[in-house]
Amino acid sequence: MSDNYYSGKTAIITGGASGIGRSIAFGLGRAGANVVVGDVDATAMESMATDLSAEGISHRIERCDVTSTESLQALLDTSLEAFSQVDLVFANAGIGAGEAGPIWGFSEKDWQWCFNVNLWGAVNSISVFMPYLITRPDRTHMIITGSGNGAYTVLPDVPIYTATKAAVHTITENLHYQVQMGGLPVVVSALFPGPHVVETGLFNSGRVRPEEFDKGVIGNETGINSVEDMKRMAEEFGINIQTTHPDEVAEMALAGIPNGDFWLLAHTDESKAKIQRRADMIINKTTPVPESVG
Ligand SMILES: NC(=O)c1ccc[n+]([C@@H]2O[C@H](COP(=O)([O-])OP(=O)(O)OC[C@H]3O[C@@H](n4cnc5c(N)ncnc54)[C@H](O)[C@@H]3O)[C@@H](O)[C@H]2O)c1
């Protein structure tokens, strides 16, 4: 990372009170940036505030629901009031709805909640933050958290999540093309957490499931409510799932951003092989076979 790229800059991070967003906030804060965290998890926001203060990181933490443009606009207004300008936006909030079983049996509530947060959260963030970012005379950054699951592979375990992230990626790539064609001073980046399953609260998203999307089930129908559950279950089938710490994701992202990288992505030989197999399958029109998770 170029040493002082982030010093004195201000970053907004949605879904920044936990997991990858939290690690990004600390990475930026330690590099001298002001961080503004928007989230809906009051408990996580409280401990985030304590921990950021303990490190002397300049910050604001606000309740912000990415499914609402008003809420995102309020987050931008607060950021500008506090720090006069915003240089980086991480549209990062996301959830897993915990769907399981056949697609035709999924609860409508799962479809709606997951699309609301993952897809509309990204769309709303673009609608609220881009008009501001393009007016800045200096280079600014819009970083959207997608997922390789949806963007370039289709894993068979969480079809709703995969569908949201497929849409998020096409929007991110198109946003990049529009910014490039318009000669605008915003760098758009697609962040792919990984290279393995990242140890975050994503498998326990039910903790922030709004009442309107309650489907009367506690926890995920898969029985997997944490990365640990996933590892344990995989081990029963003789599969060893590797994981990635969210700090590693933040480090990779923060190293790529100053270079203006579009792909904030850590490949492994296995991830490249998966993409290759998918491309080959499409080119050769062979019958799809599912890839394994992990
Ligand atoms: N964990 C992984 O392996 C992985 C892999 C690929 C992509 N991702 C993506 O990374 C991003 C961050 O997720 P994470 O893995 O750190 O999980 P996480 O659950 O630890 O963090 C997600 C945060 O988003 C917040 N959030 C949920 N709904 C929100 C809403 N409506 N408005 C604002 N904030 C909301 C949660 O409260 C939480 O703090 C997500 O977009 C996720 O899809 C994660």
Image (cartoon, rainbow, N blue to C red):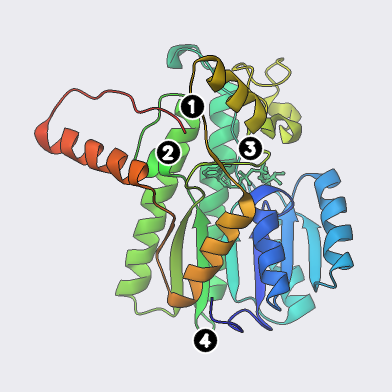
Does the CB distance between marks 4 and 2 fall below 8 Å?
A: no
Q: Quadrant of residue 217?
A: top right
Residue 202's disc number = 3
Residue 138's disc number = 4
Count how many numbered circles sit on residues in the image: 4
Q: Secondary structure at mark 2?
A: helix
> Label 2 belongs to which residue?
149
As measured in the structure, the alpha-carbon distance from the residue carrying label 2 to the one carrying label 1 is 9 Å
Q: Residue 8: percent from the left, percent from the top? A: 69, 84
Does the CB distance between marks 2 and 1 fall below 8 Å?
A: yes
> Label 1 belongs to which residue?
158
As measured in the structure, the alpha-carbon distance from the residue carrying label 1 to the one carrying label 4 is 40 Å
- Image quadrant of ligand 1 equals top right
Q: Earlier in the sequence, mark 2 or mark 1?
A: 2
Q: Secondary structure at mark 4?
A: loop
Q: Secondary structure at mark 1?
A: loop
Q: Residue at x 41, y 56 (%)?
A: 172
Point out the frontmost of discs 1 and 4.
1
Residue type for callout 2: Asn
As measured in the structure, the alpha-carbon distance from the residue carrying label 4 to the one carrying label 3 is 34 Å
Q: Earlier in the sequence, mark 2 or mark 3?
A: 2
As measured in the structure, the alpha-carbon distance from the residue carrying label 2 to the one carrying label 3 is 14 Å
Point out the frontmost of discs 4 and 2.
2
Residue type for callout 4: Asp
Q: Is residue 275 visible?
A: yes
Q: Residue at x 60, y 43 (%)?
A: 94
Q: Secondary structure at mark 3?
A: helix
**Residue found at the far bottom of this picture:** 137
Residue type for callout 3: Leu
Q: Residue 195: percent from the left, percent from the top? A: 47, 47
